[in-house]
């Protein structure tokens, strides 16, 4: 029986509607500023999608394009940190070569870090504080919850230990009492590990990496990869070889991507509410 495709856009729309309704009911307008550095076409596309989605539900969005050097970016971040009208600051990644991402992200006021990637916010996840979670990891958790996937006691394997997905997701799954194995390029006997997984999340940036012979019958597959192959978007999972073996799978596109944007909107609203808690 073919795997059920998880409609990430449908789930994302549900959360976007919740944010829109709260904004409308309370007569507020949260504001997010996106910092876009360089000329990466994919980054410009993602920023455009985020801007249109957020503006559609009542979030004010500004895009700043500073000079492509570290000092200019840090000066802009400091200015935005001190601007009480700005509730969220997002630096579009990746940054151009020569500019260290951690140096930049760590200078954002952690209470305005709506991408959830500040070292303090990543660290808080390990203590069970998910007040500002990493957007993609948060989106994956929400997908699993909305599909009624049992996390407690489940054997979950994450492929990829990056700061954007793997590491924050590890903490969030452990917080829900899952048994989690975080695999990476140095992992030995990977197939032996993935074949025992109830849930596999793949975030390594290699098209078609996870194949049908690496999974067990009925497993749940979450594909975070976005790879351009011959002009088409492909995930990190070889869809054709797993589709008759897995029970559920997120498609690419239309799976995790929309959820990342929805969680950005949700984080921005949360930041606004906390910043105005004493009003």
Image (tube, rainbow, N blue to C red):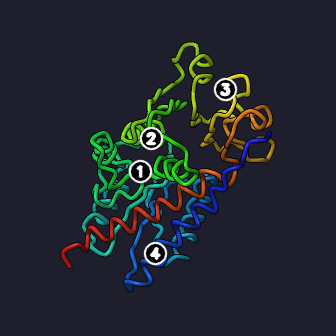
Q: Which mark is residue 169?
A: 2
Give the Cα distance between marks 4 and 1.
Answer: 28 Å
Q: Position of residue 113 (x, y in %)?
A: 35, 57
In primary-sequence order, the first of circles 2 and 3 is: 2
Of badges 2 and 4, nearer the viewer stands 2
Give the Cα distance between marks 2 and 4.
Answer: 26 Å
For disc 4, the marked residue is 59
Locate the C terminus by quadrant: bottom left
Nearer the observer, 7 or 92: 7
Locate the N terminus by quadrant: top right
Of badges 4 and 1, nearer the viewer stands 4
Q: Is residue 68 above or below residue 149?
A: below
In primary-sequence order, the first of circles 2 and 4 is: 4
In primary-sequence order, the first of circles 4 and 1 is: 4
The residue depicted at 24 percent of the width and 67 percent of the height is 82
For disc 3, the marked residue is 216
Helix, strand or loop status at disc 1: loop
Please identify the quarter of the rendering in which residue 245 is found.
Answer: top right
Q: Are marks 3 and 4 in contact (CB under 8 Å)?
A: no
Helix, strand or loop status at disc 2: helix
Give the Cα distance between marks 3 and 4.
Answer: 43 Å
For disc 1, the marked residue is 69
In primary-sequence order, the first of circles 3 and 4 is: 4
Give the Cα distance between marks 2 and 3.
Answer: 22 Å
């Amino acid at each position: 029986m073919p795997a059920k495709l998880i409609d990430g856009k449908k789930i994302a729309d549900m959360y976007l509607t919740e944010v829109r309704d709260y904004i409308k009911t309370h007569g507020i307008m949260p504001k997010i500023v996106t910092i876009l550095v360089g000329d990466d076409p994919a980054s410009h596309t993602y920023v455009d999608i985020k801007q249109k989605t957020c503006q559609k539900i009542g979030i004010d969005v500004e895009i700043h394009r500073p000079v492509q050097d570290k000092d200019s970016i840090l000066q802009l971040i400091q200015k935005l940190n001190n601007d009480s009208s700005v509730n969220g600051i997002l630096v579009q990644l990746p940054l151009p070569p020569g500019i260290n991402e951690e140096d930049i992200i760590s200078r954002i006021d952690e209470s305005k870090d709506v991408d959830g990637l500040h070292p303090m916010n990543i660290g808080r996840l390990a203590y069970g504080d998910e007040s500002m979670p990493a957007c993609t990891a948060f989106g994956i958790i929400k997908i699993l919850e909305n599909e009624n996937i049992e996390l407690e006691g489940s054997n979950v394997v994450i492929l990829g230990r990056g700061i954007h997905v793997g590491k924050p997701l590890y903490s969030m799954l452990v917080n829900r009492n899952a048994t989690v194995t975080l695999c990476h390029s140095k992992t030995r006997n990977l197939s032996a590990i993935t074949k025992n997984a109830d849930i596999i999340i793949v975030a390594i940036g290699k098209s078609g990496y996870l194949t049908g012979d690496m999974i067990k019958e009925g497993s749940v597959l979450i594909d975070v990869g976005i790879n351009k192959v011959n002009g088409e978007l492909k995930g990190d999972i070889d869809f054709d070889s797993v589709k008759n073996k897995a029970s559920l799978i997120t498609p690419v596109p239309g799976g995790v991507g929309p959820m990342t944007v929805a969680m950005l909107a949700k984080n921005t609203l949360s930041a606004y509410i906390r910043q105005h808690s004493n009003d």
